Image: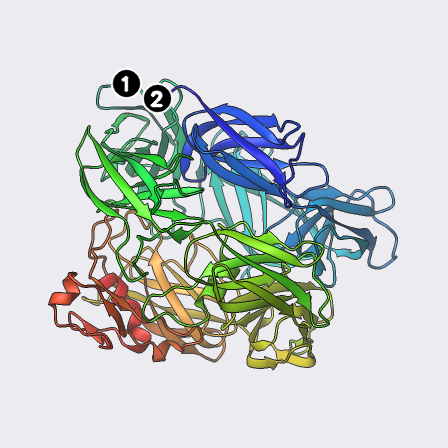
């Protein structure tokens, strides 16, 4: 209860204050401070907002800059938000046949790092996006009955502006739908409708007040319909929507469903506000759309969940500072019902995170208390103090991380257990002190091109290289590429950079332009100075052929496993031509996905600065995988398992559905449509993960031919721990596998054995290869079994 002051500052990349920035402060992504506060930064860049106590997350935007974000604690940990100078992108939308400009078209940007809003073309058909971060972007435009995409994506650098893009609109069909309530015919509200084609293309819209859904420009094909409603019940499966060149009108019925009202209280009977309540029906038809909804309690602890299906209902609540119930409350729902949920306050862990010199560690620092029930987390304050609430009684290990990196005890390695062990008692506070390595280290350097000239818009990250036994070389580079939690440094006008606040160790330093060129150096020690030379980029270019017909739209995925680089780009109405530019040298797997089929090329060598052309991808018709999901112990069929398939190499898109034939039925049977031919990884996991006794399963298959290809049985194993309970610590680690390892070549080799741990007393030795667990094979392509078995 009560309010706390969240304070922070908005800075530019040079450290200067940004005044009058628009700032939004709310709870962090895992919960924390409740409510949302809006304010503006002062002349010195600082801001303050009153929110509920706890973890906070703030975002800011200012004229001439991109948006940025930061996290902290209200009160106690100041939030720092860094903004980079904005880039902009513009162009014109024209009719493909007449070349006339098209006013009033909606334009959006597809970027590697996410979409960037929507704008409308003016009377001259022109559009412009501002506040853009450096990235690779592709404009997409539509208007009722017409659709188009830029022929290629473009790379925009820091503070760069382009206004020369052209988007051609081609005829498309409109789909006008209406969601109505079965029986009274009233409009279905708060529904989200999605049309999904086998190749992964989808169209989505939420219902308007009158229940209507408007999709302005849909490409030809047959689309499965999925629907999610907050306050009513989807009656899926719905008939497919077949789209050609003419407008389509369709009506979908939903049911009012049943309602559950209730309150969430603590052990003393006091209401808990801002608790998250989730209700769902379980069991029944495995392929039926799941009926469930969530609500947040009001000040009186009350909630109301609507649109529920009759049957067995599971309902649970969670709130910051309280213990989640080990099992949801269950009831047989035959009509509207009332329920009262109680959350225990549990125990508390308080403490400090200090370095070896007794100083607080600069943040944001996240502290986690992990026990059998997974535990909870909190953000440390600027003085190093923290409070983790809502813990079930029992043993916990308390650890700290900063921007995703473990804060280690002095003198330890990544193979050692970090943190401290504590025992939590209900209604009591347990104290702990975490002493970690000192931070404050720096790596400096310069980023230049192949002529030695400075690159002034490069982002730079430093990723600590693990000293754990069995770590694969290059893993830090791959982690740096995909890490989201670290704020990168930006080079200045001389190409220089400083990456600061580093813990002791050696680092891989990566300089990159988002979606473009890059350079890296491994083994850079803290305190070092390094020059990173960005070499000329390369490109891959070719055509996609599909027999007699030229594909209208294709999606090309390139993957360089050693670098951990992957990029997917789409090409629309290009006559099958495609080009992927600004690539580093490497060995690439290439895959294409289209309505007409799939194709792949493996290990395409690309040299520095090479522009490889003439690559031909010949589409082979997709197939439908059929088979059965069975229990790996008993051979009995397992229903309600989602089955997905993807080429082992070459990438390609997963096509996601959860209310279709790719969910195993009562006999375990499934169908996965639109699957590429060749060597495939087939993965299986529960449709309802929380309610299922099963873990993930899978196998590698070869699929060739046409139409339906039966792959036989796919095994899945039961979980060995109850849901919500973590597995135990076995006291050893495994050697990392090279990123391009074939499934049949997977080897589970022991990399390290921790002294005093369970494995140290078992006779297991470093270098031993694990081939069975409890008599079940885990070698090669069966390696997936190891994790559910242990």
What residue sits 11% from the left and 66% below the top?
761
* Residue closest to the eye, 344 or 533: 533
* Residue closest to the eye, 429 or 199: 429
* Quadrant where the C terminus is found in the figure: bottom left
Crowding near the residue tagged with mark 2, few <14, some 14–19, many ≥20 C-alpha atoms within 10 Å: many
In the rendered image, which residue does mark 1 sit on? 270
Tell me: residue 557, above or below residue 48: below
Local SS, label 2: loop
What x and y, as percent, mark residue 705?
48, 80
Judged left or right of residue 152, residue 686 is: left
* Quadrant where the N terminus is found in the figure: top left
Q: Upstream in the sequence, badge 2 or badge 1?
A: 1
Whole-angstrom CA distance, mark 2 to mark 1, is: 8 Å
- The answer to which image quadrant residue 23 occupies is top right
Tell me: residue 713, above or below residue 313: below
Judged left or right of residue 373, residue 590 is: right
The residue sitting at the front extreme is 357
- Mark nearer the viewer, 2 or 1: 1
User: Mark 2 near mark 1, Cβ–Cβ under 8 Å?
Assistant: yes
What residue sits 52% from the left and 61% below the top?
481
What x and y, as percent, mark residue 500?
52, 51
What x and y, as percent, mark residue 628?
32, 67
In the rendered image, which residue does mark 2 sit on? 301
Local SS, label 1: loop
What x and y, as percent, mark residue 200?
55, 60
Q: Is residue 620 visible?
A: no
């Amino acid at each position: 209860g009560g309010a706390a002051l969240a304070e922070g500052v908005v800075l530019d990349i040079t450290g200067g204050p940004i005044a009058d920035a628009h700032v939004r402060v709310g709870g962090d992504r895992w919960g924390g401070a409740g409510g949302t506060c809006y304010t503006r930064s002062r002349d010195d860049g600082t801001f303050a907002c009153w929110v509920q106590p706890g973890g906070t997350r703030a975002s800011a935007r200012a004229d001439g800059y991109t948006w940025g974000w930061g996290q902290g604690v209200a009160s106690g940990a100041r939030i720092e938000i860094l903004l980079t100078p904005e880039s902009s992108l513009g162009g014109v939308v024209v009719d493909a046949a007449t070349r006339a400009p098209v006013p009033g078209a909606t334009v959006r940007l597809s970027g590697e790092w996410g979409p960037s809003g929507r704008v409308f073309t003016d009377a001259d058909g022109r559009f412009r996006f501002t506040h853009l971060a450096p990235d690779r972007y592709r404009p997409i435009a539509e208007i009722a009955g017409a659709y188009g995409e830029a022929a290629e994506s473009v790379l925009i650098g820091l503070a760069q502006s382009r206004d020369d893009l052209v988007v051609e609109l081609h005829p498309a069909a409109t789909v006008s739908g209406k969601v109505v309530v079965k029986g009274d015919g009233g409009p279905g509200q708060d529904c989200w409708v999605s049309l999904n084609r086998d190749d992964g293309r989808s169209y989505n819209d939420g219902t308007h007040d009158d229940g209507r859904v408007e999709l302005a420009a849909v490409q030809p094909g047959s689309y499965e319909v999925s629907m999610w409603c907050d306050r009513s019940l989807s009656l899926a499966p719905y008939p497919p929507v077949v789209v050609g060149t003419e407008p389509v009108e369709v009506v979908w019925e939903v049911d009012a469903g049943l309602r559950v009202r209730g309150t969430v209280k603590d052990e003393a009977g006091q209401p808990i506000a801002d608790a998250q309540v989730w209700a769902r029906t379980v069991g029944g038809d495995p392929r039926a759309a799941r009926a469930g909804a969530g609500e947040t309690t009001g000040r009186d602890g009350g909630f109301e969940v609507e649109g529920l299906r009759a049957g067995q209902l599971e309902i649970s609540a969670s709130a910051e500072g309280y213990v989640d119930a080990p099992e949801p409350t269950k009831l047989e729902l035959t009509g509207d019902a009332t329920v009262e949920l109680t959350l225990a306050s549990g125990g508390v862990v308080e403490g400090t995170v200090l370095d070896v010199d007794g100083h607080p560690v600069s943040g944001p620092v996240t502290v986690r208390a992990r026990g059998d029930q997974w535990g909870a987390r909190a953000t440390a304050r600027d003085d190093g103090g923290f409070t983790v609430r809502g813990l079930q009684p029992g043993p916990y290990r308390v650890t700290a991380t900063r921007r995703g990196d473990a804060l280690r005890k002095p003198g330890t390695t990544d193979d050692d257990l970090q943190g401290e062990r504590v025992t939590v008692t209900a209604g009591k506070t347990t104290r702990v002190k975490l002493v970690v390595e000192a931070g404050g280290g720096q790596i400096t350097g310069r980023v230049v091109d192949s002529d030695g000239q400075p690159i002034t818009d490069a982002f730079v990250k430093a990723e600590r290289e693990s000293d754990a036994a069995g770590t694969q070389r290059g893993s830090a580079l791959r982690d740096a590429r995909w890490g989201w939690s670290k704020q990168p440094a930006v080079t200045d006008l001389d190409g220089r950079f400083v990456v600061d606040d580093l813990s002791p160790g050696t680092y891989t330093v990566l300089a990159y332009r988002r979606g473009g060129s890059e350079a890296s150096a491994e083994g850079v020690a803290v305190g070092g100075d390094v020059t990173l030379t960005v070499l000329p980029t390369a490109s891959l270019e070719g055509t996609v052929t599909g027999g007699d017909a030229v594909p209208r739209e294709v999606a090309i995925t390139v993957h360089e496993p050693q670098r951990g680089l992957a990029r997917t780009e789409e090409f629309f109405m290009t006559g099958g031509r495609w080009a992927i530019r600004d690539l580093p040298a490497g060995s690439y797997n290439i895959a294409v996905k289209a309505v007409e089929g799939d194709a792949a090329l493996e290990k395409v060598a690309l040299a520095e600065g090479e522009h490889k052309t003439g690559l031909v991808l010949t589409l082979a018709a997709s197939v439908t995988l059929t088979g059965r999901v069975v229990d790996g112990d008993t051979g009995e069929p397992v229903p309600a398992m989602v089955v997905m398939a993807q080429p082992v190499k070459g990438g390609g898109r997963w096509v996601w559905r959860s209310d279709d034939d790719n969910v195993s039925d009562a006999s375990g049977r499934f169908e996965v449509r639109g699957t590429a031919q060749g060597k495939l990884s087939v993965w299986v996991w529960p449709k309802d993960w929380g309610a299922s006794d099963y873990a993930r399963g899978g196998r590698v298959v070869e699929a060739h031919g046409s139409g339906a290809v039966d792959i036989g049985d796919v095994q899945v194993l039961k979980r060995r721990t109850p849901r919500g309970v973590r597995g135990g610590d076995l006291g050893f680690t495994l050697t990392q596998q090279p990123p391009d390892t074939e499934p049949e070549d997977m080897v589970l080799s022991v990399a390290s054995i921790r002294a005093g741990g369970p494995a140290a007393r078992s006779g297991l030795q470093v270098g031993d290869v694990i081939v069975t667990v409890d008599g079940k094979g885990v070698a090669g392509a069966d390696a997936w079994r190891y994790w559910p078995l242990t």
